[in-house]
Amino acid sequence: MPLKDLQKQVDDWTGQYRPQYWPPHENLARLAEEVGELAREINHLYGQKKKKASEPEGDLGQEIVDVLFTLICLANSHDLDLDKEWQKLIAEKLNLRDKDRYDRK
């Protein structure tokens, strides 16, 4: 699914609320919170800090899409075209900035 379709889904859903998007600093705080929840889940899965028996089962996929949803809200609130931004990133990574950065297979 193209990013523009994801952006539209988010825009359609948030369009029923006021304000439609949180102010940038609130969105950033929410993003930090969501990334923290993702980090906690990864730590439970792969780190030394395991979940307590009383804690519910986590869902890594849902934690990742929570971060994505929040990023899309931030992009939408700034009228950014994520498909366009993604293409710029990939072009730069493949052809400029990281072209020789990593060992090739």
Image (tube, rainbow, N blue to C red):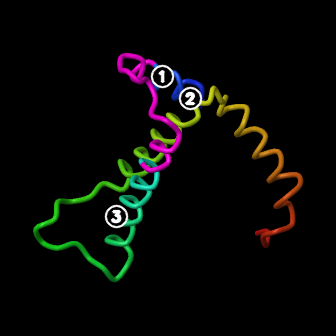
Task: Categorize mark 3 by other alpha carbons within 10 Å: few (<14), some (14-19), many (20+).
Answer: many
Magenta-colored span: 12-29
The percent coordinates of residue 86 (x first, y second) are 70, 40
Residue type indicated by callout 1: Asp
Tell me, yes or no, whether the two marked residues, 1 and 2, touch with CB atoms within 8 Å.
yes
Name the residue beneath numbered marker 1.
Answer: 11
Name the residue beneath numbered marker 3.
Answer: 41
Of all residues, the one furthest to the bottom in this rendering is 48
Name the front one of labels 1 and 3: 1
Q: Does the magenta stretch include residue 15?
A: yes
Q: Which mark is residue 63?
A: none
Name the residue beneath numbered marker 2.
Answer: 76
Say which element carries label 1: helix
| Image quadrant where one finds the C terminus | bottom right
The percent coordinates of residue 35 (x first, y second) are 44, 57
| Image quadrant where one finds the N terminus | top right
Task: Identify the residue at image location x=54%, y=37%.
Answer: 74
Name the front one of labels 2 and 3: 2
